[in-house]
Image (cartoon, grey):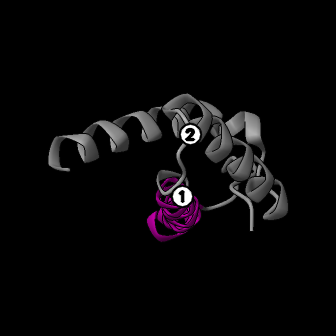
């Protein structure tokens, strides 16, 4: 399933439920992607590489994952980079 821009045809009735369903689908796809990012980060954390190398590995892994599930890397990359930075900063505060 891929996140698509929600459009309705002129003169077509759109309900709140129909509109909200698009949001729910986006959350479901996003949750799968972000959980996969976190799992990849945990896997990379076990390696003895630099933080920059670990992040590059995670990004390459996620790019491949997105391709496999039919999502566009260009759509997700900025959000994923920000998410990684926030998650890692948060993690570092508690380790």
Q: Is residue 10 visible?
A: no
In the rendered view of the protein, which quadrant contains the N terminus?
bottom right
Residue at x 54% of width, y 61% of height:
43
Residue 67 position within the rendered picture, expressed as x and y whole percent measured from the top left: 83, 54
Q: Quadrant of residue 29?
A: bottom right
**Identity of the residue furthest to the front in this view:** 48
The residue that disc 1 covers is: 30
At label 1, counting other C-alpha atoms closer than 10 Å, the crowd grade (few under 14, some 14-19, many 20 or more) is some
**Magenta span dominant secondary structure:** helix
The residue that disc 2 covers is: 49
Residue 24 part of the magenta-drawn span: yes
Residue at x 57% of width, y 41% of height:
54
Residue at x 53% of width, y 46% of height:
48
Please report the bounds of the magenta region as a residue range.
14-43
Residue 42 part of the magenta-drawn span: yes
Q: Is residue 13 visible?
A: yes
């Amino acid at each position: 399933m891929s996140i698509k821009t929600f459009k309705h045809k002129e003169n077509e009735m759109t309900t709140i439920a129909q509109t909200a369903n698009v949001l729910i689908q986006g959350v479901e796809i996003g949750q799968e992607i972000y959980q996969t990012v976190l799992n990849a980060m945990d896997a990379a954390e076990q390696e003895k590489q630099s933080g920059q190398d670990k992040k590059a590995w995670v990004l390459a892994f996620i790019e491949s994952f997105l391709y496999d599930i039919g999502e566009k890397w260009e759509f997700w990359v900025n959000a994923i980079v920000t998410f990684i930075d926030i998650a890692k900063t948060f993690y570092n505060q508690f380790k």
